[in-house]
Amino acid sequence: MNDLMMWLKHLANINGINIVITDELDENDTDISIPAANTIVINENYKTTVDVAFRLAHELAHLIFGSNDQNKVYGFSIFSNKESEKSANRNALKIITKFIYKDVPLEYRNWVRFMEEFGLPDHLEHMVKEEILNA
């Protein structure tokens, strides 16, 4: 995961995105991305089963790929049905799977292990399978 986190931070850097990682927020405060400031705030105390690498990739996806919603702030919301959140989930998966599976043959790609390692909820199963196959 360290290599992935370094890659995500590099991706942020080359896109001019600032990442603030803090342990000063409450466990109920989600990670956020702020398009106008090109900034992501990752809350180390946020109570979730979702791995921080996926959370960072999700927030990066909001800023790199944009959204039709044009929100002033995006809060991490993996269970949301909003199109902007579904799109950020898919783009986060694209970012991560292309990094992890770039040199891995299809027969060695395990979507179940991927979902477990990143703490992803079951409703993302179809999306995870697609992106792992397409990576």
Image (cartoon, rainbow, N blue to C red):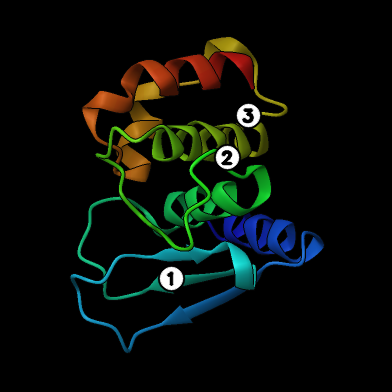
Task: Check residue 101 in the rendering and tell me which mark sits there, or answer none.
Answer: 3
In the rendering, at what x and y percent does residue 62 appear? Answer: 55, 49
Residue where numbered disc 1 is placed: 42
**Where is residue 117, by image quadrant?**
top left
Query: Residue, x 44% and y 16% (percent of image)?
Result: 129
Q: Amino acid at mark 1?
A: Ile
Examine the rendered structure and indicate whether residue 68 appears above or below residue 41. Answer: above
Secondary structure at badge 3 equals loop
Locate residue 2, reporting x and y percent. 56, 61
In the picture as drawn, the residue positioned furthest to the top comes out as 107
Q: CA distance from mark 2 to mark 3?
A: 8 Å
**Residue at point 62%, 73% (across, down):** 37
Q: Secondary structure at mark 1?
A: strand
First along the sequence among labels 3 and 1: 1
Residue occupying the point 77% across, 59% down: 15
Image location (x, y in percent) of residue 127: 42, 20
What is the secondary structure assignment of the residue under circle 2?
helix
Taking depth in this image into account, of 43 and 7 the one nearest to the observer is 43
